[in-house]
């Protein structure tokens, strides 16, 4: 408990088994994990993620339920939480700016909803995107974003940057007024930018965009959800380079 209290301020909270599992799979340094039922966590690991079961058991310490509740009043239903080191910003920036880029960077322009941002990071990890950059005030490493992403921050590069410091590369801004995405191929070095839930792409990002791109949508529907839009655009990118023999 003392270790948890000493570490938690500078660390990333992995809330629940799935976040811990993904963080371990993608080489996070997990400093400590707490549960009040080690046997149940072991059983869960054996069932859902035998590849990291030993690492989970090694990281986890059993503490009384009352102690756990005091530290984590809204404990995840899987009954475990962990603290991990946040990757160095310099390493993330190096990954985001490395060329040649083999997969797009997703840019969220002033997103507002923590759950949406997490869902986008999960998509980016699944599609093997180079990373996710947010502009604006939202912290992309906020515990609720990490929870929404199921800990997949560690599978891609996640950073916050101002618009004028975005990585180089052709910027495609997703906007319902743009050119139909089905008429173009998105290059591997693209920046795919998405606007905020409430007000869409900012003027600043619009000015930096090389193209405005729309997702097919019938009239009278105003827009798609942010994370859904990211999923469609990444799928479109992945489908262009896909081959049955080698994947992407
Ligand atoms: C919920 S929408 C924003 C709606 C906002 N009221 C607006 O004026 O754009 C969030 C983001 O998802 C993307 N998006 C949603 N529907 C889209 C569509 N049909 N075509 C392209 N992008 C879309 C855009 O990047 C948009 O800024």
Image (cartoon, rainbow, N blue to C red):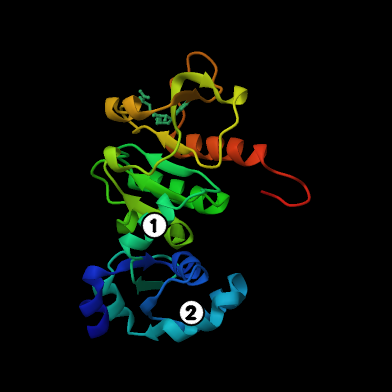
**Which x, y percent locates residue 94?**
39, 57
Instruction: Tell me where residue 243 appears, x and y as whole percent.
Output: 74, 45
The numbered disc on residue 94 is: 1
Label 1 CB sits under 8 Å from any ligand 1 atom: no
> Which of the two residues, 20 or 75, is positioned nearer the viewer here?
20
Left/right placement of residue 131 relative to residue 65 reads right
Disc ID at residue 62:
none
Which residue is drawn at the image coordinates 34% and 29% (left, top)?
Answer: 208
Q: Residue at x 35, y 72 (%)?
A: 84
Mark 1, mark 2: which one is toward the viewer?
A: 1
Q: Residue 143 lies in what quarter of the image?
A: bottom left
Left/right of residue 73 with respect to residue 130 in the rendered view: left
Q: Position of residue 52 (x, y in %)?
A: 55, 76
Judging by the rendered image, the residue that carries numbered circle 2 is 56
Q: Earlier in the sequence, mark 1 or mark 2?
A: 2
At 49% from the left and 34% from the top, the residue drawn is 229
In this view, which residue lies farthest toward the front?
99
């Amino acid at each position: 408990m003392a270790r948890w209290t000493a570490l938690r301020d500078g660390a990333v909270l992995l809330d629940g088994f799935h976040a811990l599992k993904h963080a371990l799979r993608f080489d996070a340094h997990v400093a400590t994990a707490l549960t009040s039922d080690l046997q149940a966590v072991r059983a869960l690991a054996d069932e859902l993620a035998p590849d990291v079961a030993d690492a989970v058991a090694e990281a986890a310490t059993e503490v009384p339920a009352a102690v756990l509740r005091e530290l984590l009043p809204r404990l995840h239903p899987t009954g475990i939480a962990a603290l991990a080191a946040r990757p160095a910003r310099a390493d993330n920036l190096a990954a985001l700016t490395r060329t040649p880029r083999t997969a797009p960077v997703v840019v969220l322009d002033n997103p507002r909803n923590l759950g949406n941002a997490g869902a986008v990071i999960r998509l980016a990890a699944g599609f093997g995107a180079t990373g996710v950059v947010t502009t604006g005030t939202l912290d992309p490493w906020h515990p609720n974003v990490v929870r929404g992403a199921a800990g997949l921050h560690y599978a891609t590069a996640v950073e916050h940057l101002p618009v004028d410091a975005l990585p180089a590369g052709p910027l495609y801004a997703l906007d319902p007024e743009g050119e139909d995405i089905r008429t173009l191929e998105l290059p591997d070095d693209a920046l795919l930018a998405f606007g905020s839930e409430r007000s869409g792409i900012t003027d600043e990002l619009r000015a930096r965009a090389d193209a405005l791109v729309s997702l097919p949508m019938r009239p009278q529907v105003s827009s798609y959800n942010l994370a859904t839009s990211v999923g469609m655009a990444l799928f479109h990118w992945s489908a262009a380079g896909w081959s049955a023999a080698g994947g992407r």
